[in-house]
Image (cartoon, rainbow, N blue to C red):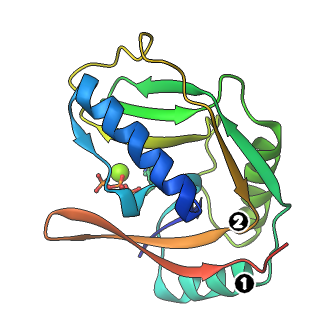
Amino acid sequence: MRLFLALIPPPALRRRLAELAERAHARLGGRRVPDDSLHLTLAFLGERPTAQAEALARWVEERPIPEGEWRLDAWGSFRRPGIVWVGSRTPDRALTELQAALWQDLERHGVAGRPSGFIPHVTLLRRAHRLDTAEMSPPDLAWPYRQLALVRSFTDQDRARYQTLARSPLS
Ligand code: ATP
Ligand code: MG
């Protein structure tokens, strides 16, 4: 199965992110990420055998993460797939440390593919027609978090769907 580790926004924040996606979509076009799919990916694990997915689920269920609050204050984009996102102006230290710590554990579980860089972001649009986010008033949101999710990604009726397989204990 195709797996990733993510933070899932609390409901009130999900609504705010959805409003930002709506604003961005009105200006920049493309395809909005469905509200129920909004997330922050901390590690993309790729395709994993079922037995390993089960071991990873047990690991996540026993691995609390430090509680934190991520401040989202910037728009951003990735040119190639036409992605428009919200994130932070400067890389968030707590998230960067969390990502590094998770990859250390993942490598111990035999998961390779640790990326050389990490830009924490929430994808709002794909295949945007334009990427000029500079004129849009900057976002200002706080994301309080204390739980990690192991998520399976699959395709259903041509739409990417996510299913949470495991959650970390609350810190
Ligand atoms: P689709 O690829 O079908 O459009 P998706 O991108 O939502 O849908 P996945 O490709 O399974 O679904 O990705 C799940 C999460 O992992 C997303 O947040 C995605 O941005 C991220 N991701 C996917 N591939 C990589 C990669 N090679 N490196 C880092 N993150 C990735
Ligand atoms: Mg993808």
State left or right for residue 50 relative to residue 60: left
Q: Is mark 1 within 8 Å of ligand 1?
A: no
Q: Nearer the viewer, residue 24 or 129?
A: 24
| Snapshot quadrant of residue 146 | bottom right
Q: Is residue 91 above or below residue 156?
A: above
Residue ID at (54%, 89%): 51
Residue 139 rendering spot, x and y as whole percentages: 55, 29
| Snapshot quadrant of residue 31 | top left
Kind of residue indicated by mark 1: Glu
In the image, farthest residue toward the left: 157
Q: Is residue 14 above or below residue 22?
A: below
Quadrant position of the N terminus in the picture? bottom left
Q: Secondary structure at mark 1?
A: helix
Between disc 2 and disc 1, whose residue precedes?
A: 1
Residue named by callout 1: 61
Residue 19 rendering spot, x and y as whole percentages: 40, 43
Q: How far separated are the C-alphas under marks 2 and 1?
A: 14 Å
Q: Is residue 147 above or below residue 95?
A: below
Q: Which mark is residue 106?
A: 2
Residue 30 rendering spot, x and y as whole percentages: 21, 34
Q: Nearer the viewer, residue 159 or 80?
A: 159
Residue ID at (47%, 46%): 17
Kind of residue indicated by mark 2: Leu
State left or right for residue 141 relative to residue 93: left
| Residue 149 visible somewhere in the drawing | yes
Quadrant position of the C terminus in the picture? bottom right
Instruction: Say few, some or many: other residues with alpha carbon within 10 Å of mark 1 (under 14 / 14 to 19 / 20 or more).
Output: some
Q: Nearer the viewer, residue 86 or 168?
A: 86
Q: Secondary structure at mark 2?
A: helix
